[in-house]
Image: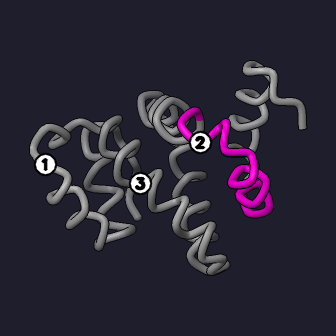
Amino acid sequence: MGKMVYATIIEALFARFPFLEQRYLEEGSYIFGLAHLCYSFIFVPYIREVIENKDILVIECVCDFLEDMAICEDELVSELLVVSVLETILSERALIKELKKYLKTETMGWLLYLEKAYGWET
């Protein structure tokens, strides 16, 4: 996959997970072009599904994508990861516990930072 940039971050999501585009279209025009809404309302529920289904290969693919966001040079992309993905699921402790088994270095760093900031001791 090419370099991630905020201007095309919705397209990057669909490039990696093409079936999510249909969910995006079904959600309605109010989220079109709005990355934070797209990731909160489309990608986060998908993350919950993959963790619930326990399909390790898919979980790893999701975590690879999260890591690509975390290491991206475009700060708006890592901000999107933190605000609209990680903060959104932070209070879902069972989900976080399972997700932590697969997170890569930079994503884990952001998650641990948020846990500390919000008082979730691990």
Magenta stretch: dominant SS?
helix
How crowded is the residue under tag 2: few (<14 C-alpha within 10 Å), some, or many (20+)?
some
How crowded is the residue under tag 3: few (<14 C-alpha within 10 Å), some, or many (20+)?
many
Q: Secondary structure at mark 1?
A: loop
According to the image, label 2 marks what residue?
89
Mark 3 and mark 1: Cα distance apart in space: 15 Å
Type of amino acid at the residue the image marks with label 1: Gly
Mark number displayed over residue 118: none
According to the image, label 3 marks what residue?
43
**Relative height, residue 29 to residue 112 (above, below):** below
Q: Position of residue 29 (x, y in %)?
A: 9, 44
Mark 3 and mark 2: Cα distance apart in space: 11 Å
**Relative height, residue 43 to residue 120 (above, below):** below
User: Could you tell which of marks 3 and 1 lies nearer the N-terminus?
Assistant: 1
Based on the picture, tell me whether residue 65 belongs to the magenta stretch.
no
Mark number displayed over residue 28: 1
Q: Nearer the viewer, mark 3 or mark 1?
A: 1
Q: Position of residue 114 (x, y in %)?
A: 71, 28
- For residue 53, side relative to residue 27 (left or right): right
Q: Nearer the viewer, residue 119 or 106?
A: 119
**Relative height, residue 116 to residue 70 (above, below):** above
Type of amino acid at the residue the image marks with label 2: Ile
Span colored in magenta? 87-103
